[in-house]
Amino acid sequence: MGNDELKRLVVRSYQAIFVVLTIVVQGCTAGESSVNQDLRNMAQQAGIQIAAVSNRRLEIVNYERGQPDYVMEFGPLIGPTRASPDGRYVGGILNNYEVGATTGRDKVVVIDTHGTVVWQAPGVWSWCVALSSDVQKAAFQGDAGLFYALRQSAEASVKLWPAEAARTPEERGCSLAWSPDADRITYASGGKVLIYDFRSSKSTVFADGTYPTWSPDGNWIAFRRPDGTAVVRSPDTGMEKIVAGGDKILGSLRWSPDSGYLLYRVRSYRFTNVWAAVTTLSGSWTSRLRVYRLRDGASTTIVPALPSNSGEHFGWLKTR
């Protein structure tokens, strides 16, 4: 093979590589654009938006600007929050000391997306809350174990689940979720994802991992594996597949009401805007808020930088 022929072969090889890379990049860009359009359609047609409820504030993600916009004062002062599976309600824990009460009793508080309290019940301080699909039950997990509250007019009963449901010292965050018919609940403890069944009054180990969430249609449980990657697994067949592009995620994956999309965070140190720069320089690393489409694996970043302590407040809300 002569030098000229070798040069032509090298050039053709580079051209082929360039074409492949171009196709890949275009495919990724098209996928991101498609997911972004889906999110806009959801907001315009169904009123489903990605939003955060924290410290009496409702903030909705502005997809054009890539950051949350403050919308209004919202409900009572509550701690960790989580939207109901259909996005119509938000559950949280209210610490009465923070609002001047003398009893010191924490409460489970359920509010609608207008900020009106729908019901509340005695509870315990917790870093995670979950509402059942009919919003008649609220589960919460703390250092003492796993609890749930039943709505009974204005008040509710609170029951304690097994002590093994308590968070271990290394578990700083948590996530739990009801099955669609509210006869089971998935939670994590000791690095294991478990399912508690009300019919047998027993917990069984589902997988190694943390931060489980149950899809509203009941077909999947999403969770974070010990290596930080995200998976969804069928509670019926055990079939499992990697999601979020194999990225190492932070915290939980939150399902859209139609079970077609997952909201999650990945770590980011990029100075993408003033907010990111200030929080990073002050000692707080930032994270990116992303959305993954289950049917084809396409994903997009909707907020390029968030303060590290705000990501778990975001979820899917039906705002109209």
Image: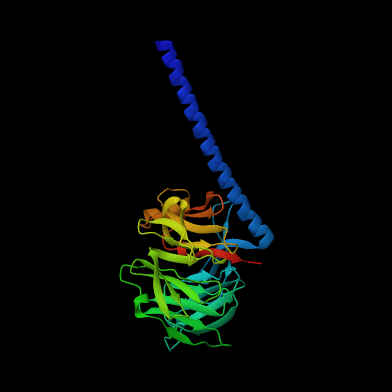
User: Which of the image's four quarters has the C terminus?
Assistant: bottom right
How far across and down, in percent of the image, does residue 278 sit?
Answer: 42, 54
* Residue 125 rendering spot, x and y as whole percentages: 41, 78
Q: Is residue 272 above or below residue 310?
A: above
Residue 17 visible? The answer is: yes
Q: Which of the 4 image quarters holds residue 160?
A: bottom left
Query: Residue drawn 54% across and 52% down?
Result: 66
Quarter holding the N terminus is top left
Q: Nearer the viewer, residue 241 or 123?
A: 241
Q: Nearer the viewer, residue 265 or 212?
A: 212
Query: Does 1 sit above or below residue 67?
Result: above
Whether residue 78 is visible, yes or no, is: no
- Relative depth, front residue between 147 and 68: 147
State the residue in front, 106 or 193. 193
Query: Is 128 positioned to the left or the right of 291 in the image?
Result: left
> Tell me, what colour scheme is on the image?
rainbow
Q: Is residue 34 left or right of residue 20?
A: right
